[in-house]
Amino acid sequence: MNYWLVKTEPNTFSIDDMEKNRIEAWDGVRNYQARNFMRDQMRIGDMVLFYHSNSKPSGVVGVCKVTSEAKPDHTAFDPESMYFDPKSSPENPRWILVELKFVKRLPRLVSLAEMREVPELATMNLLRKGNRLSIMPINKEEFSIILSLANN
DNA sequence: GCCAACGTTGGC
DNA sequence: GCCAACGTTGGC
């Protein structure tokens, strides 16, 4: 099983929305590296940390689970969608999505600042300067450290 | 709101 | 294939 972290701006889609919807198609990903992670390495049952970016404070707020294989991101075909991409077509989809299922909220938010203080987390992609990936792999240790921080 | 870092685009 | 210009991300 693999572990992941996904970012979202809570103004756009928050853990509240995730909890309410229970299952959400993770559409709108328009970055090749993030897409390739979803396409090549994400599997049903993988665990996902849910991260609020551009927030006060930014941090990890919940846990989700991958509940589908990668499939075409239909929002790319819709001229009305803010994620429309004329270079993607149903015959030859450029972008994909997976479905995420709400698992739980963390007892409290684990902030970026707090994660930076934990030496074992220093290698996380999330904490690296200039990191802009919206979907990134993490390892099992990082996943459990962050969960245990939230329980302190 | 600022701006550094990074990805993408397109002219050549 | 290089690289300047541009757009976006996201912490602060």
Image (tube, coloured by chain):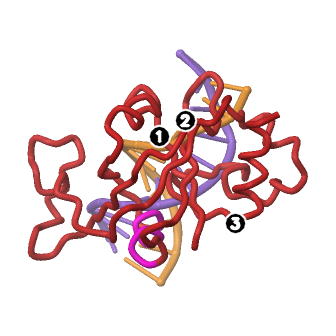
Chain colours: A red, B purple, C orange
Q: CA distance from mark 1 to mark 2?
A: 5 Å
Q: For the residue labelled by badge 2, is the local secondary structure a helix, a strand or a loop?
A: strand
- Tell me if residue A10 comes above or below residue A143 in the rendering: above
Amino acid on which the number 2 mark rests in the picture = His
Q: Between residue A6 and residue A151, name the one nearer to us.
A: A151
Q: Crowding near pointer 1: few (<14 within 10 Å), some, many (20+)? A: some
Q: Main secondary structure of the magenta part?
A: helix
What amino acid is found at the position of numbered circle 1 in the picture? Thr
Q: Residues within 10 Å of mark 3 (few under 14, many from 20)?
A: some
Where does the image place residue A72, in percent across and percent down from the top left? 22, 66
Disc ID at residue A8: 1
Q: Which range is magenta? A: A33-40
Three-letter residue code for mark 3: Asn
Residue at the spot x=46%, y=71% of the render?
A42
Mark 2–mark 3 distance (CA, rounded to whole Å): 19 Å
Q: In the rendering, at what x and y percent does residue A44 appear?
A: 42, 69
Residue A29 vs residue A90: left or right? right
Q: Which residue lies under the disc numbered 2?
A: A52
Determine the CA span between mark 3 and mark 1: 20 Å
Q: Earlier in the sequence, mark 1 or mark 2?
A: 1
Residue matched to label 3: A139
